[in-house]
Image (cartoon, rainbow, N blue to C red):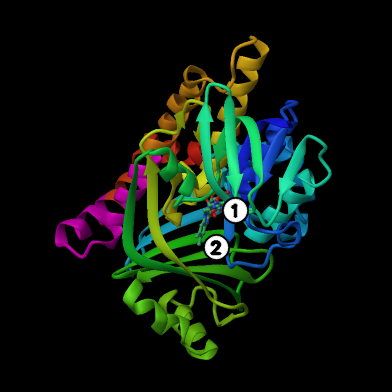
Amino acid sequence: MNKYDVIIIGSGPVGLSLAKSLSNESFSVCVIDRQTKDDLAKPAYDGREVAITHFSKRILKDIGSWDLIDQSCISHLKEAKVINGHSPYSLHFNFEETNQKTLGYLIPNDRIKSAIFSSINDDQMISFKEKASSKTFSINSDGVEVKLESGETIHGELLVAADGRLSGSRRQMGIPAEVKDFGKTVIVCKMDHEKEHGNIAYECFHYGRTLAILPMVGKQCSVVITIHSDKADEILEQDDATFSEDIATRFNHRLGKMAVTSQKFSYPLFASHADHFHSDRFVLVGDASVGMHPVTAHGFNLGLRGIDTLTRTLVEAKANNEKYYSFENLKKYNQTHQMNTRALYYGTNLIVDLFNSERSTAKFMRRFALRLGNNVWPIKKMIMDQLTENK
Ligand SMILES: Cc1cc2nc3c(=O)[nH]c(=O)nc-3n(C[C@H](O)[C@H](O)[C@H](O)COP(=O)(O)OP(=O)(O)OC[C@H]3O[C@@H](n4cnc5c(N)ncnc54)[C@H](O)[C@@H]3O)c2cc1C
């Protein structure tokens, strides 16, 4: 009977990054996913342009994926401005106030995913079960058994759930999670524009909807709209000319004429946080542990931070001849990662509530929050450190 050190359910960007990170440390890994290897090698464009921090770049470099990303599609984020309604006042972040050459990077999600897959494809320590769905699993003192829909059974020492924010494995394990449904939909697409964007990212909180304009390479940007779900179809069905004109107007023509150049993609907006991330021989990673609202662009970044923490925890236990899959060892991962996620998760949800509320106190608080952020250096520094830290 073949027994893997680690079985990972889910080959999203986090599951695959973890597989590579563990194989680099000589763990044998089996990854299970419904998708085929072809789907993973050439993922379809999904409209997501993912903001990546310096820390995440380092992790992607360590697992050999960063250099496989087509470097010509990586955009450098130099400044970020947060705008309240139509006020000219903005909360402003500039890379010059940091010790880095850029605040972060913006990369198409499909390019990130294909690069991660390329880095694991020929890895002898990683087995891949494609077109495979986990049906049930059992865990006892001898190990983990995962039954696939096909009837095949896979054996391992540790089971990792990387199966996304509605994780079926988390549910099967009986780990409670808070799920916050914002009742909104996020719509994303690519647009060309007339004027240079200067590598500045904008987050505009208009009443009832938000508009983010994220600078891509050249005179192109990623447009991210959040809107009440009952109004989403209206936007999705707009013809290209009407949509383009509407976005340019809402953005006060800062980039001149704008023209949509891709399909519009929509995602339901909800966030989730698991009560705890571990059990005996079982851990949660990526969106299965914390599914973030995209406004602060932390989902994948937090997933990579969790991978770094989990890999260190397992490697240290193995080096000390301890059971790396034991409850006590995995508790260390849980404690460290909960400290990294909780404040960001609740902080992000608070910002979203504050900037979407129509109450007059919230409108006042918004103006106050932007000025506080700009003028109180410790707050601004904390946010910028979060963006630019690479340790
Ligand atoms: C519009 C938008 C913009 C975003 N922007 C950013 C950003 O700027 N920065 C950032 O850091 N994050 C961003 N995110 C978040 C980021 O995309 C996610 O955090 C990331 O994709 C999570 O990866 P994952 O591998 O944990 O989960 P997923 O990508 O959800 O992958 C889960 C995998 O599990 C598989 N699976 C599920 N169940 C089973 C089963 N039973 N058996 C086998 N396989 C199974 C699925 O097929 C899938 O491949 C954004 C998200 C959205 C929607």
- Residue 237 vs 19, above or below: the answer is below
Q: Residue at x 68, y 53 (%)?
A: 112
Q: Quadrant of the C terminus?
A: top right
Outermost residue on the front side: it is 151
Judge: label 1 CB < 8 Å from ligand 1.
no
Q: Amino acid at mark 1?
A: Glu
Which labelled disc corresponds to residue 149? 1
Q: Which residues are magenta?
A: 344-368
Residue 57 visible in this rendered orientation of the protein: no
* Percent x, y of residue 266: 48, 71
The residue that label 2 is drawn on is 214
- Residue 54 vs 294, above or below: the answer is above
Q: At numbered mark 1, what does the secondary structure look like: helix, strand or loop?
A: loop
Location of residue 379 by image quarter? top left
Viewer-proximal residue, 170 or 380? 170
Q: Residue at x 32, y 77 (%)?
A: 230
Disc 1 vs disc 2: Cβ atoms closer than 8 Å? no
Q: At numbered mark 2, what does the secondary structure look like: helix, strand or loop?
A: strand
Left or right: where 85 falls relative to 147: left
Location of residue 232 by image quarter? bottom left
Left or right: where 107 falls relative to 384: right
Q: CA distance from mark 1 to mark 2?
A: 41 Å
Q: Is residue 355 magenta?
A: yes
Viewer-proximal residue, 384 or 254? 384
Left or right: where 297 falls relative to 74: left
* Percent x, y of residue 132: 65, 53
